Image: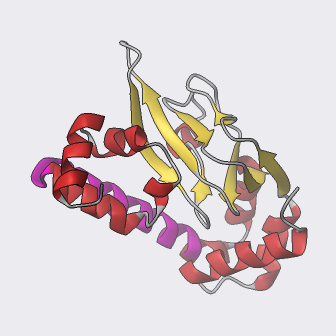
């Protein structure tokens, strides 16, 4: 394990506090149900078709969320970077199989916890509500902006938006994953990068 528990706790606390001023005691309670888990590069956090039980907090890695369509095409839904949660959220809440895979793109450490236990904490103490509200608000805004980008922006704008949202990520992951995320072919991405004098 590359991350010590005290470091992991401080990272979690900082992220929670960035959303809402949650009392340390509640963060301590959440941390108590967490397990430090290491994922090797290529290891899956969840497979499509599995019913998830847990979610994770990304301490130092990169996870990719992706679909596989009927023709076997790999379609990138999004990424979880440092300080973000790793989760198939709608499947978790609805207790149904996930529609997508979540894969570690690099060796990654997460704080993993059973969602139902955290749900019980939230239901017992309404002081969690501001954090949950802000977290879901951020997810909704991100989803809306991504939908707007696919409907109104050209491929170059979507690529530049990706670079702003995920600085330096393209230097770590494969470029065809970037192309998939912004909805174009790798060849089209190469032409855009050449036009922008990035290659």
Q: Position of residue 56 (x, y in %)?
A: 69, 53
Residue at left 73%, top 85%? 23
User: From what the image shows, is residue 1 above or below residue 132?
Assistant: above
Q: Quadrant of residue 40?
A: top right
Find out whether residue 135 is within the magenta segment: yes
What main secondary structure does the magenta stretch of the protein show?
helix
Q: How many marks?
A: 0
Residue at left 70%, top 63%? 59
Q: Position of residue 33 (x, y in %)?
A: 85, 58
Along the line of sight, the residue nearer the viewer: 168 or 142: 168
Along the line of sight, the residue nearer the viewer: 185 or 71: 185
Q: Coloring scheme of the render? A: secondary structure
Image side of residue 94 versus residue 111, left or right: left
Q: Residue furthest top?
A: 71
Find out whether residue 19 is within the magenta segment: no
What range is drawn magenta here? 131-154
Q: Quadrant of residue 131?
A: bottom right
Along the line of sight, the residue nearer the viewer: 153 or 15: 153
Query: Looking at the figure, which quarter contains the N terminus?
Result: bottom right
| Residue 148 visible somewhere in the drawing | no
Q: Position of residue 150 (x, y in %)?
A: 19, 48
| Residue 143 visible somewhere in the drawing | yes
Residue at left 88%, top 75%? 6
Residue at left 50%, top 32%? 100
Image side of residue 123 versus residue 179, left or right: right
Q: Position of residue 125 (x, y in %)?
A: 71, 72
User: From what the image shows, is residue 39 above or below residue 197?
Assistant: above
Query: Looking at the figure, which quarter contains the C terminus?
Result: bottom left
């Amino acid at each position: 394990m590359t991350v010590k528990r005290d470091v992991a706790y401080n990272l979690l606390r900082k992220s929670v506090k960035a959303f809402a001023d949650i009392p340390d005691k509640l963060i301590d309670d959440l941390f108590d149900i967490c397990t430090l888990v290491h994922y090797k590069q290529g290891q899956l956090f969840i497979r499509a078709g599995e019913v998830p039980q847990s979610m994770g907090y990304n301490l130092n890695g990169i996870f990719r969320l992706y679909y596989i369509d009927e023709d076997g095409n790999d379609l990138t839904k999004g990424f979880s970077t440092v300080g973000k949660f790793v989760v198939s959220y709608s499947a978790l809440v609805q207790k149904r199989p996930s529609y997508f895979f979540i894969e570690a793109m690099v060796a990654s450490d997460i704080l993993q916890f059973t969602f139902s236990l955290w749900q019980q904490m939230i239901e017992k103490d309404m002081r969690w509500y501001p954090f949950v509200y802000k977290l879901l608000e951020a997810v909704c805004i991100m989803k809306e902006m991504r939908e707007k980008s696919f409907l109104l922006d050209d491929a170059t704008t979507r690529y530049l938006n990706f670079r702003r949202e995920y600085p330096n990520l393209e230097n770590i992951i494969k470029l065809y994953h970037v192309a998939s995320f912004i909805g174009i072919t790798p060849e089209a991405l190469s032409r855009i990068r050449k036009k922008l004098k990035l290659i």
